[in-house]
Every structure is written in C-alpha cells, then in structure tokens.
Amino acid sequence: MINQLLMIITLVSIWLSLAMALIILSSATHFWLKNSNAHANIKQLARYPLITLVVPAHNEAVVIEQTAKAILNMNYPADKVELLLYADNCEDQTYQIMQKLVARSNYRQRKIKVINRHGTGGKAGVLNDALKIAHGEYIGVYDADAMPEKNALYFLVAKALEKPEQHVAVFGRNKTRNADQNFLTRCINQEIVVTQRIQHVGMWHLFKIGRIPGTNFIINTDFVKEIGGWRNGALTEDTDISFKIMQSGNLIALAYNSEAFQQEPETLKSYYLQRKRWAKGNYEVVIANFKHLFDRSNWRVKLETFYYSCTFFWFNAAIILSDIIFIANVIFLFLQLIWPNLTLPFMFAASNIYIAQLLFFNWMLMILLFLLQISMALATQFGQATTKQIWLALASYFTYSQLFIVVSLSAVTSVTLDRIFHREGNNWVKTKRFND
C-alpha cells in the first residue's frame, strides 16, 4: 500500500511539474512568435543617464582585461559611464592589470576607478561598497568573465526608460562563450539557453516577473539604497535582491536584446562547486521567503516563492523518488533471474496496471518536454537548432541533467547542517577561468 502511494504521489508531482513547464514554454513560444522578426534598431534615446558599472573581480587576472575593454568599448556615451573595477582580496595580478589598463592613453579621460579591496562579504560586499561611491542614476554589474555585446548597455537603459517608475531594474541575457570546449560546456550551454530564452522570457511575458542574473543588469541606485543594498555574504545575491524588488511592488524588466558572454566551468569539480553554491543560495532565499506564501505579500512574490519551492524541493524530490522506484524495480528484475519468486517492490495490482502504464507514459513525457524546451530555445538562436544539438540534448538528459540531483542533495544537506551547527555556510569557492 505504501509503495503504491509513493507511486501515485510521484505520478501527480510529475503531472504538476509538466503542467508548469508547459505553461512557461507556451508563454515563451508566444513571445518569440511575436518578436522573432523584430529588428533591433538602435535609436537615439530621449536621454542618456549616467550609469555606474561595477566589476567585482577575485583573482581574475586571466579574463579581467578582456572584460574591461569590452565594457569601455560599448555603444553608450563615454562620459555617461562610470566604471568601478574592484580587485577583491586578490592574490594574483588582477589589480596590477587593472592599473595598467586604465593608464593607457585612450582610457585616461574615462571615468574609471580601480579599488584594491580587502573587505568581507564576497560579491555582495563589493556591490555595497560600490553603492557608497557610485554617482550613476543606475548601477550595473558585470562579472569579471562576462564580456558584454557592444549594445548590451544601450538595450538595458532603453528598457528602463520605457517605464522608469516601474522598471527599477532591467536584466539582459547571458551566453556561454566557451560552449564548444567539451561535452560538459555543451550541456551547460543548452541549460543556459533554456533558462534565458524559455524560463526567463516565459515568466516575464506571462507574469511580468523578472529575475536578476549575476551579471548584465542595471538597477536604480536610489532604489537599491532604499531597500538596504545587497545582503553581505549572500551566496546568490541576485536572487536575494530580486525578491526584495518584487516585494516592493516594482518590476525587474527583461531587455531580451541585451547580451553578455560569460565563461562556464570546464571540469566536473568546478561545475559541482559552482552549482552547489548557487543551489545553497537559492535554498536559503526560498526558506527566507517561504513565509510570504501565507501573508499579504505582493502576488508576484507568492508566485515566485511557490515556483522556486516546487522546483527546488517538491519536484526535485519527485524526480529522486521516481529514480529510486525505477532503479529498485530494475535491480529486482535482475534478481528474479536467480530467485523467480521475488516480486517487484513498486507494482500495482493487475486491475490497476493502467496506473503503472500512465506512470511510464509520464516519464516519457518528461523526456519529450525536455527535448522540446531545448529545441524551442535553440530555434530562437541563429545557427544552434541542429540535429547534433538534439542528440546532445538526449544524451544530456540521462547524464548532465542527473547531476542536478547530486548537487541538490548535497546543497540541502549542507544548508541543513549549517543551520543545525550554526556554522558559516557562505564560503566563496572561485570558478576557474580559462584563456579564450
């Protein structure tokens, strides 16, 4: 009876996750059908507000020069860009490279400040320090490995000026610049494309819910000060401040034409450490905001909390449970070759065999929806919708995607132990950079 109950719970959970995914996919599809043929015209803006761009860099000697050059060469009036380069507790040549760059003759007239920081708080600490000295009407962030496309800042500002009273923050898209490095980076690229082109677009188009990414975004400086800035030590400062903005009733708008190119982990170890940090940060944010499901908070906060709770807790648990059911039955099938009288641990009676068939059908739907999401996302990017990518997606489902289960279990365990033993869980583990 318990075994059958577990199968039914798994069945219902999968149906709900499929329904949510289909709603977001349908919304994103509608958006791209409306905008896929739109031309990205660069028109004169009504005004060009001063933008303070912050680049937090911790031991980023490999990539910082490329990123800083890309920022300084963007299509935005040079006198309207203030650049703050932070060498945060660096042990390499990051600070020296920054100094040499700003000393060049073509950059001497630019508003650039290099800060050799030895403070605490990680990236959020850097952003709070920058907030104290920023002169811009908006403050923007680019990670040290995130090279913005030439018009990235223009599109962010244009979107902010559409409804300046509501759009207190605007975010763009991030693309993988080392996607072809190996199997892992190819899989990460597909994940990033689906996240950016389906999930973010779908949520914005249907609910006007935006999520600040870690890079390529701007936010109204005065507003950030009003809400107390970033939470020092937050592992996912972007998710944390996104909830603060939604709680205020304002919007985080999507500028889908704004793009930046960032490096992704090229080894399993780097991937695991990065994603565990992200997962821990998201779990912490969900736990902190879970109470808003039951109070009079902004409806977008409630919906986003529910979405995150389902994604990171309920549906993740359902996937783990379905894997356990599948693996247990497979093991017992092999054991039946030795002991024929053994019965499978997760089976329905003959009269309820259609439920078992439905469960198997659901698993197939999950795979098909996974492939559909990737195919739709890739179709919105020139040259990426290929047969090779479909085969990669299928291989990714049974390999790369399953890594999320390992990362999630590790993150949940770590968050639980942090709370039980009151230990500091916000240790920053740097993602390794590569020359490209």
Image: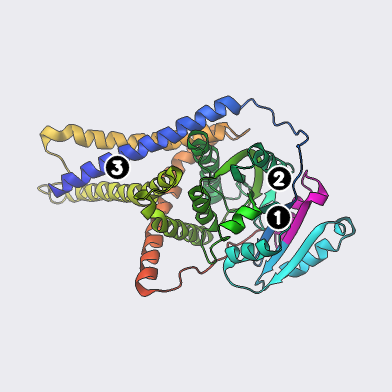
Q: Nearer the viewer, residue 386 or 14?
A: 14
Q: How is the image coloured?
A: rainbow
In 3D space, how far apart are the residues under numbered discs 2 and 3 (Cα atoms)? Answer: 41 Å
> Which is more N-terminal, label 3 or label 2?
3
Quarter location, residue 173: top right
Q: CA distance from mark 3 to mark 1?
A: 43 Å
Front-most of residues 386 and 197 = 197
Image check: 67 left or right of 408? right
Kindly identify which numbered label has been placed on residue 19: none
* Numbered tag placed on residue 153 in the rendering: 2
Q: Position of residue 152 (x, y in %)?
A: 70, 43
Position of residue 3 in the picture relative to residue 226 (left or right):
left
Q: Is residue 115 within the magenta segment? A: no
Q: Is residue 300 above or below residue 266?
A: above
Specify start and end residues of the magenta stretch as a single range: 61-84
Asked whether residue 258 appears in the rendered view, the answer is yes
CA gap between label 1 and label 2 equals: 10 Å
Q: Residue at point 66% right, 52% down? A: 146
Identify residue for label 1.
53
| Residue identified by numbered label 3 | 13
Q: Residue furthest right?
A: 105
